[in-house]
Structure formats: C-alpha cells, structure tokens
Amino acid sequence: MRYDSITLDSFHTAWLPASIQAAMLRLDKIHPEISGNKWFKLKENINAAIAQGRTGLLTYGGAYSNHIAATAMACKEAGLAATGIIRGEENGAKLNHTLQTAASLGMELLFVTREDYRNPALKAHWEALYPQYLAVPEGGHNALGAKGCEEIISIFPTTHFTHILCAAGTGTTLAGLINSAQPHQRVTGVSVLKGAQYLEQEVRDLLHAGNTTPWELLHDHHGGGYAKQSPALIDFINTFYTDTGIPTDIIYTGKLVMAFRELLQQGYFPENSHVLLIHTGGLQGNLSLPPGVLSF
Ligand SMILES: *Cc1c(COP(=O)(O)O)cnc(C)c1O
C-alpha cells in the first residue's frame, strides 16, 4: 500500500480560536475501498498470516462493517482468501453496498444469527472450519491491529502537535496512537458508543509496558449512541465541509470534529495548542443516507 495520497490538511473555521492550530490527517484518502484506519489495523495481521503460511483471513462484522469491506480488499491485494462471519441473517435478494463490495472482492460471506454471533463457543467452531486461516477479531481489535496503527503518526512529521484526537470504536487505533506518540503529546479518544466504559481497559490491555504518554477516552460525545444521527450532526458535517473542504462521515469522524468544537468551547485546549485530528475514513458509510442530505 502506498501512502502518497494521504495529506495533512491545516484547517480554519469560525469556531476555531486564533490561538489554536488544527490539522486533519486524511487517512480517508488512502484507498477508495480500504478506508482510513482499517488498512493500518489489518496490515500486521496480513503480514503475520503470510509469515505463518496461512492461506486466508477469517473475520467478523455487522452488515455495514467498514472492517469487512477493508478485509476483503486487503486480502485480495495480498493474494489471501477471506471469509467474513456476518452478524444477522441474509436479507433475501439484495446485499447492501458494504457486503456487495466485499463479495465482489472475493470474500466468502457466512451469515449467522445475532445470537450465534455472540456465542463464544461458535467462534471456536467456525475457526476450526478454517484451520489454514488466521482469525482476526471484529474491528481488527488485537495487538497486531494496534501495532499497525503505530505507523499512522509517522507518515508526516507530527511531533510538534501537542494533542492528537481520534474517534474510538474498539479503541485499537487509539491504542496504536498512544503507543507511538511522544510523552509530551496528549492523545484523546472520542467514543462513538454510549456507555462504553469497558473500552478503557481494552485500550490499556493493548498499551506497551512503561508507556508514559498521557491519554484519555471521552464518553460524552456519542451523539445518542452508535450510528445515531441528528439534524444538528448533519448540519455540522455540511458546514464543516463548506468551511474546510474536508468531508466527514456520520458515524465516526463527523462526531469527532463535533467533539473537537465542544472541547474547544469547554476550554479543553490551552492557548497555543497544536491539535492533530485523525481522519479515520468511513465515508462510504454516508451512502446509507438518502441522496441530497449531505452537500458532498
Ligand atoms: C472502524 C472505524 C473507527 C474505529 O476504530 P477503532 O480502532 O475500532 O477504535 C473510527 N473511524 C472510522 C471511520 C472507522 O471506520
């Protein structure tokens, strides 16, 4: 994977005080199908699969999972087979955009009921059906996933930033950022899940021993819960695009930038802060909206 298309974009908006600098690391531009952070979470898993002589990856996700589409693409590029265990029964005739993409890239899709999906005993059963495959947890949430994310802040020089902000789903990306940030930087994750206090421990479990970078996970910016939208969020995303030319998504990055504005209003950032926001991608998720709702 080449990173030439990724950019680091400084931006200005009416709500950004003159004393604070902000920039967006555009991982969304990395690849049309492997969006944003998903490639980084997969790369070390793919390398491990190849090093171990595995023939494919087996992974898990919901019907709208960016991770499923990204795994299909990454495996195709690496010459590995891919199977996705998909939560929820197959919806008769028509696959949604995410699953169509995955299937067209050669991923085998196995639909299981929500109940079966949650059953840990069945996980072992499915994985035993594919002994030659490397199993990767839902969302790419493992130590190899976090390791791959350590590369994110070294694509451009970023040590002059005082703060790094990212959206958190499983917290894997956040853990990789904390592991690779400098001790003088502060890393803040914005949970897009409601009441996901368990994430603190999951992030901690992925941190290198002795890491001293200050970090924090915020739980009050989920906008009603995972994938919940509001007219305020849609307005915000449209205005942010008009002001900066940066498109964001309704599930992760739109809420991240909205949280950034709220944190500024709360005085979270001292004067002269340099804030780096990580654009983790997810723009294809906007395809679930009716046409015309977003201005881009
Ligand atoms: C999956 C995803 C995330 C969440 O990443 P985690 O490592 O699971 O916290 C954030 N942003 C976008 C756009 C995603 O698709």
Image (spheres, rainbow, N blue to C red):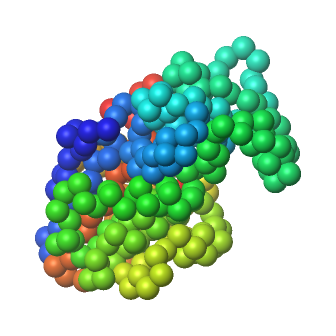
Q: From the viewer's perspective, tell me whether residue 273 is left or right of residue 81.
A: left
Q: Residue furthest top?
A: 93
Percent x, y of residue 214: 39, 83
Count of numbered circles in the view: 0
For image coordinates 56% across by 21% down, the residue present is 106
Would you say residue 254 is visible in this rendering?
Answer: no
Image position of 175 with respect to 29: above or below: below
Percent x, y of residue 19: 15, 75
Percent x, y of residue 94: 67, 17
For image coordinates 25% across by 43% down, the residue present is 3
**The quarter of the displayed image where residue 126 is located:** top right
Residue closer to the observer: 44 or 287: 44
For image coordinates 42% across by 36% down, the residue present is 34
Image position of 262 with respect to 154: above or below: below
Residue closer to the observer: 39 or 246: 39
Image position of 236 with respect to 296: above or below: below
**The quarter of the displayed image where residue 149 is located:** bottom left
Q: From the viewer's perspective, tell me whether residue 202 is left or right of residue 39.
A: right
